[in-house]
Structures are given as structure tokens and as C-alpha cells.
Image (cartoon, rainbow, N blue to C red):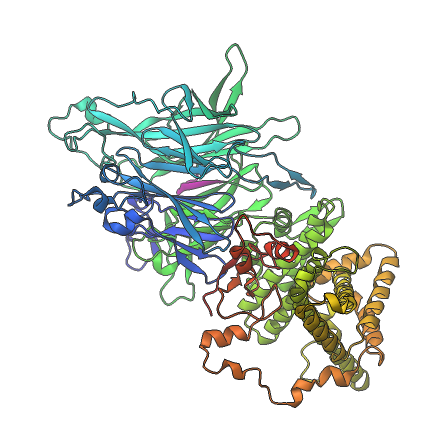
Amino acid sequence: MFPSSSSKSKSWSAAPTDFNFPSRPITWSSSSLLLTPDPVKPTIYARHFSSSVQFALTSPVPILANPDRWGPASVLSTAPSDEWLFAFFPKREGWHDPSSNGEQAGGGTPGTQAGAAWDSADGLWCLWQRGMELDNWTLKECWPTPLGKRIVAASWTGAPRQLRMDASGSIERLPLRGLQVPPVSGPVLLLVNQAHQLSLHYYRNYVLSMVSVTCSLNQMGQYSENKPYPRNEQQRGPTVRLCTDAAIGQGYNDNALLLATHASTYPRTRMNGGDDPPATLDVSDEQTHRPPGVPVAEYESWGEESMIYLARVVVQFDGIMMHLGVEALNPVYCRAPHVGRMQFIATPPTGDKHELHHLAVTYLDYGNYSSPPESELVLYTVQHYEGEIRRWAPLREASRTFPSCVIDRVFEAPSRTGVYVVVLDTTCPVPSSRSAVKEAPIGKVVELKISDLSDAENTEPSLLVAPASAIGSHLPLSVALSPNSILLCTVGPSLGTPSTWIQSLPRRKPFTLPRTGDTSIPPLSSTYALALLTRSTTDDLAHVLAHPSLPKSELSSTMYHAMLLSESRQNGLPGLMKFEALGVVTEAYKMRAKLCVDEREKERLERGWMAIHDLCSLSACNRAFDDCREGGEEEYDRGAVWQLLGLSCWVVEFVEKLVKQCIRSSSLVETMARRGALPTFTPDPPLDAPALLLLAQPFALFNLQTVLEHVRKFRAFLAAIPPQTRDENIEIASTTLTDLVACSGINFPAVGAMLMESIKEMKDMKGSGHIDEGRKSLATAAPTPAMKPAIQKIIKQLLDTEKVNKSLLFLKASDLVDDISHLSLHGSSSRQKKIRMMKDVILKTGLLPQDPVFVCLRCGGHSQAQNRIMKNTGPSDKLDKWGAWEGIWTRRCICGGSWASSTDL
């Protein structure tokens, strides 16, 4: 950093070395986990973006045996499904093993790869697999890498098919992208090392051990899975070429890979009398003195090469083994002394246009290192030419520069027709320590067209900011895109505690939907709709909408249009899309309530997301009753009687709570009619209570009536079982449910019949206005004004003396005696007492203190439903109907959130 020339000025100027600092790898997984390596130690930390869950991944045995030998991870990559994580740990520079014992030095791997292989290892790469919870990662593989073969780039295949929305709101499903290999049971790991070699690592179907195949990017030829790798590539002479950076490109409907590699030439040094190349050497343009005895021609060849080499690798499977065919393409000549970043970008085929492969390269020119570097972004198109000889060749398409700025990174934009470019300023003003401004802009992110690198018209650039106290030390040299490509996570190059900063990406401008004539649709609506259709995480989207600076109307409008757009492509599954939308609304309003400062508004938001979450529970209960049916319409699986009783008890309690809310609202309506105003203690109008939307929202009303019908049929089923075939569980369940319904004060058959009439009236209504109002009520998490007459009518019918006995409803027998249910808690630990007071968010029963508890990272609910599934995983274990329903929620909560091990109990 260069200080300002004037002592009174408050500005910062970048130094050339600020942009030459090695970046730290960081990845933002598809389940919203931020994975970052420790800046000093060989440890990887994970933190869930929208919660307080954070943990460190289990280190392999070699690192635990000798942590001082290994440096921090230099390569980090997660699979598209977020079930696998790859990391490479290089050997720490200057480290020498004082011990000659191989196992003691390297630690070995469990059972294999000990001894000499670990003694000479220049690094190790590890592979973790995720379990059912986000914080459950198991180390699956750990392998040493020989000297001169450090990993420089990693990528994965197996990305799911993506969706794209055009300006008219039409949603298009893109073709499959990446390799499609039949015998592989999961994603394929692609690695490029310093020796210009590409290796594919994967698990074959029904094979427990990992299989790999390696090919050379320097030699054209065929390479097979079970054949040994040719060893005729050893480099001779006074210098050695090491690959320092690589980019891996995957196309659409294409079983071929495009690779770009950039190398540097280093002087060969003898290590232990051998000719193996060193891992790295300090050879840069700053070295101005030629070592004695080194020829001038050899000395001038040290450093970065002036070409980027391209190769195309075709992957084939002949039914028995995998084969790789390597085709060398014409190289790209560098336009500057230094290559910054390389990134492949694929544009999907549209209409009669074929798919295009692009290579974006950033070049840096440091000059004489007296000023910040000059940068340029160049876009090459790798085209397939038809002729006498079919070949692939790169063609320079466009270039772009930013005056007084340095181009740092290039990412593929979600539009698939543009790129995000991270541009850093070389100077910026620094706010005074007395100023209220705590942030200062240090750059921007712009979206450029892929065709000519001009600015995209439908987006606006976003600013990159840094803490005012850390200007110069928080250059975003390490960045990662959020799962929905709307946020950017940046990490500074400091060797101390990593300072993570969340930045905004260019937003799409409000657009018009031609088919509906709706204008000024919020820009995040389309992203939300695509996330709903692909069942992707929405943590980053909820983070933006939950910010207090955003009006609440913007939140509800975004939710409404997201549901409107997603329902246009629901593929005949409207219930599934509605269920996904409920979880998204729950997440957004819960996160906004957490950040809200105003207590009254906070209470409204909390009641809103809880009402939507109750609707999630009703829908899940209906699915449980449906899945446990056996025989006729009114018969259920006898093996699930006890579990269905727990759901029935929760339904009765929920309806009691809903009826009590109706009574309170009716009383307030009468008070308003007499006084002409609301009482001072009432925060909202009586018919605006979020819980009342279940009485007028079509999807909610249908689920409420259906679950009451299930409880009625289940009660009748238990009563109709002959005494000679009853067991103890059935007898207790029948008695418990009968007593619970009788003491509730609610005539459930009459209430169910009344709700059925309301549904029929709603269906008989002309037009689709009630459907649109129902969509708006879900988006606002409260009844709409148009629903109030229907709600008032249902409340009036519900409070009929034949349907509700207010004395039994409000005065329970248990309230007349001392509560002895908590006497059993005497002598229990604080954790046990806390668990006994909680209910399972899925099973709707009490939690068991002796079993593990899992927490949902979206709604905060706790559950133990996963324990039974994990216990019954043997080949002889038969999964009954209830167990199959429980299995649905092993990875996702009823609200769609992910699970994590509970740490607050």
C-alpha cells in the first residue's frame, strides 16, 4: 500500500504487490455452507450462511500425526450435489522431516499408503462425504502426491439440469452439462496437477474403492482405465515446466472436456541427488540478478511462459472400462507478461444456434513494479471447424479494459449469456475515524455480454465495499458466488483471523411480464421461481429480502410473483410447488423477524411465519395419513397406530388453538362495533391475524378439512377393530383419542362438514380471483382484505353452540389440579429438562433425552425422526409405511430446511 502524499488527505493507493498476493480458496456450496481453509494450519472450517452453525472438518491421519509438515489447503472444491468435498494440502515450504520412519513422518492412511510414499509426498489430497446433516462429514479418501505433481485445479461433473427464464417469463430447461458416464455411482472428480496431467476419480457401481484414470495434456493419444500410465514424460535439461494454473470446461450434451493450462519454467535443482523438479521456486520479475554460472539464455527462460495451452479430452465408456482421448489444440499467445485468471464459459444452444465454448483470460502487466498493474480481459471462442480435417481452434472474440482499475475475477452469470467481472480500484477515499461511515468502496462487479464484453443493459453494477478500518488489507482476492448467484463472499489475504465480507452482485432491473401485463416485477422474483422449481437453497435470497432497509411490500411482492412464475411450470404437481413455496415464505419472514428492531412489527412477522409453518405441518400430516392407509379408504396400518395417534393429538390441539383465535377475533369485532375503535392493547385489526388465513386460503382450507377428515376416519377405524384382534397399543390409542376429542369442546364432524361447504362455495366462484387472493395471502403471511368477508362468515358459523363448547374449550380438567407432569424432571440435567419440554417438529411428539436431536436450519424446529432411519439400515431391515414417510424427512425438514446436529441443547 502506498500512503497518500499529503498528511491531511484521506485516501488509499494500491501497490503492485497488493494484487500479487496468493489468493485463499473459498467455496460456497449448494447447501449454503461457506468452506474456507485456515490461513496457517491445515484445517478447513465450515459455516452455514444463515445460521450460527460452524464446525471444522475432520483432518486425516497424516495431518493429525504431523500438522507442522502440511500447509493450508491451496485447492478446495465441492460437488454440485454438495455431498463431496475435495481439498489439497501442499507440503509446507522449507519443511524437512527429522525422522526417517515413514509412518511416523507421514502418518500414513488407515491401512494403506504408508512408508516411502508418504516420506516423499509433496502434498496430500483428501475427499470428504457429507451425511444427512450439514455438519456431518466423513473422510473417505486421503492420498499422497509425488514431488512435482501438486494439484493446481479441481472440478466436478454431475451438475443438475438448470433452468433459465427469458424476458417474457417463459422458463426453459437447459440440456445436461458435463460428462455423463454410465458406470459411475456419483459425480466424477477432475484434477489437474503440475505435471500437466488430467486425472478422473470416481466410484464404479457396486465397487467400494475409488477408481482413477490419468492422461497427459502434453501428448495426444488414448489412455485407458486399467492400463498403467506411460512414464516417458520425465523432463530433462537445466529447466523444468510446471503447470501453475488450469481451467476445466464442461459443455452441454458433450462427453468431452476442454482444458487450458498455463505453465512457468523453473531452474532444476538437485534434491537428494535426483533430478525431480522442485515444487516451487521464487522466480519472478522482481529478481534482477542472474545467479553465477547460469547462461543468459537459460536465465531469460525462467518465469511465466508466453502461451496458454489448450486440449480437448474425450471421455468414452466401452461397457467395461473408461477411455480418455486427448487432442491438443492451437495455443493462445498471451497478450501480457502475466496471466491472472482463466475461466471457461459455455453458452447453451438456443434455437438454431449451436453451443459455444468461451475462454475468458485476464492479463496483468506490472511494468517496472512502480505502479499498480494494467489489466485486460480477453475472450476467446473455442470453435469446431468442419473441413478436410475436423479440428477445434481458439479465436479471439473481444477484449475489455477498465481504466484505473484491475480486473480480478470472472464468473459465469446466471443468464448464461453474460459474465460477472470483479473490478478492483487502485485508489479510493478512506473515511475518517470520526465519520459515521464504516464502509468504503474498493471496486465493483459488472455484468458484461458474452458476445462483445459490453455492459449488459438489464442489470446495474454493484459496489464492492470493505471495512473502513481495513482498507488495503481486505482486497477481495478470494471470492465465491452464492448458490443463486446474487451474493459474493470475499475473504481478505490476512494471515490472521479470516475476515469474511458479503457483497452484492449486479441485480436485474424490474421487468414486465408480457403474458400477464404485470409491470415492475421485482428482480428477485425470477431467481426465487427458479429456486422453487429446482428445489435449491434460498438462504442467500432470504438474506437480501430480510434486510431491514428493504420495505416489507417488496418482500411480499417478490414472494407473490415468484409463486406466480413457478406455478406456470409446475409439471402437473401444484401441491408440490405450493409446499415448496411455504418453506420459502417461512424462511424469509423468520429471518426478517430476527433482524427486525421494532417490537410490534417483530411480533407480526413471527406470527406470520408461524402460521405458514403450521400449514407446512398440516400438509405433512395429511401425507402421513395417506401413506399409512391400508386396504379401504378408512383403514390404516396397525403398525403405525401409535405414531398416527401423536399426529392426531397435535391436530386436535391445533384446531383448539385456531378456534380460540376465532373467538378472540369475534369478540374484538363486536367491541369495534360498539366503540367504533380497537382496544389499545390490540396491535392489529381482529381479522388480520395470520392464523386466520387457514380459513380462507384455498390450499390451507383444503389441508385443514382433509386432516380433520383423516382424524375422524382414524378414530372410527380404531373403534371398529374387533376386541379379539386388539392389542394394548390399539386399546390405549382408541381410548386416548376418544377422550381427547370429547374433552376438546369442539364438534369435529360438524366443523369438518362446515369446512367442506366452504370449499364447495370457493370452487363454485367464477373466475380465478380467489386463487390469486390465496397466492397473495401466502406471500404476505396474513389474510388479504378481500378474504375478510369469507373469514367473518366462517367464524360466525364456527362459533355456533352446536359446534363449539366454550366452557370445555377454555377450561380443561388438567387446569383444575396441580401440574404433576414435571415432578419426574427432578434430578434430571438441564439438557434433559429442556428436551422434555420440546416437541418433535415432524412426529409431533415429545423428544427423548437419551437420543440425538437434530435442528432445522430454516425454521429452528427439533426432531429425532432420523434416528429410527439410521438404526434400520441393514439389508434385513424392512421399512414399513410409517418408516417410509419418516424417510422423506431425513435430509429436509417439513419446511424444506436442512438438518444439523443440535448444539443448543
Q: Residue at x 57, y 63 (%)?
A: 859
Asked whether 97 or 639 is in front, the reply is: 639
Q: Is residue 324 magenta?
A: no
Q: Residue at x 43, y 63 (%)?
A: 437
Where residue 627 sits, quadrant-wise, is bottom right
Range of magenta residues: 402-411
Q: Is residue 445 left or right of residue 746?
A: left
Say if residue 238 shows up in the picture: yes
Where residue 142 sits, quadrant-wise, is top left
Magenta span main SS: strand
Please say if 502 is above or below 737: above
Q: Residue at x 49, y 61 (%)?
A: 51
Asked whether 12 or 602 is in front, the reply is: 602
Could you tell me residue 26's position as x and y percent?
40, 48
Residue found farthest to the top: 388
Q: Is residue 409 magenta?
A: yes
Please say if 96 is above or below 193: below
Q: Residue at x 72, y 44 (%)?
A: 571
